[in-house]
Image (cartoon, rainbow, N blue to C red):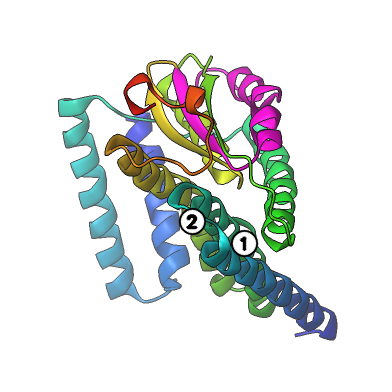
Amino acid sequence: MLHASVLGASLAAFWLLLSGYFTEPLLLSLGAVSVIATVYLALRTDKFDGERVSLRIDLPIIRYWVWLLVEIVKANIDVAKLILSPTMALSPRMVRVKATQATDVGVVIYANSITLTPGTVTIDIDDDEFVVHAITQEMADGLTGGDMGDRVTALGAR
Amino acid sequence: MTVLAAILAGVFLAVGAIFVLIGSFGLWRLPDFYTRLHAAGITDTLGLSLMLVGMMFLGGWTLVTVKLVFILLLILLTSPTATHAVANAAYTVGLRPFGVPPEDLPEKER
């Protein structure tokens, strides 16, 4: 019931913000109908797959996002410099990185963070190991020696 | 709209456009599929984010800005997933990466 009300409230807020209609009764009631239909469908499908992923936005994850944003900007500048340098000294590597996160959501956050940072792309995942392509040796070292994985693990179960 | 917001919008749009340009240049200059993914990454992380922030300054405190925030979040969540999907497809069919030392490749690929 809590899940349904939270889902309904978020969908209603999303509908209002996207449509920008706050006063028209007909359109508002149509919006309400679509929200109710979506919540009903979501609850019905939950019975089958049980793959509900709850999105918890709290202080630690916001702090992680800010940290990640800074990392993304730094990595962008590094890769941009590399592309623009006359010699373009590439030293591509395929490295294996251990994922120590306890949950699937944690592993996905880590894998997506790696890919979101230019210079490193998660190419394959087997069990708890990622295959990561890095455009230079330094980028690969920055990932294997860095603390991104520990930071995601510290976010705990999501 | 204040002059300051207009100037900030201009700066963000211009810097974002430069990063998109660098990304496109890298796409043309880099040697193979895997390295080009990194150049494409510049375009859809910093290039796109900066341009969206510039547009937010143009939009001001309106619903347009709210929609731009939704677009930014959507892109930041979906683009790494899409990048992973194409990279994984290439890796699965055995596309060999350029310049990677042989010890990094799986046994059968060496």
Instruction: Check residue B49 in the rendering and tell me which mark sits there, or answer none.
Output: 1
Q: Is residue B55 magenta?
A: no
- Looking at the picture, tell me which residue is in the foreground, B61 or A53: A53
Tell me the crowding category of disc 2: few under 14, some 14 to 19, or many 20 or more residues within 10 angstroms, Cα based: some
Vertical order, B70 against A58 (above or below) = below
Residue A132 at x, y percent in the picture: 51, 32
- Residue A150 is one of the magenta-drawn residues: yes
Residue in the image at 70% along x and 31% along y: A142
Which of A12/A111 is in front? Answer: A111
Marks 1 and 2 close (CB-CB < 8 Å): yes
Quadrant of res B46: bottom right
Q: Residue at x 35, y 47 (%)?
A: B86
- Which three-letter amino acid code belongs to the residue tagged 2? Ile
- The location of residue B40, given as percent across then percent down, is 52, 58
Residue linked to disc 2: B75
Q: Looking at the picture, how far across and down is residue A152, in whole percent?
A: 60, 25
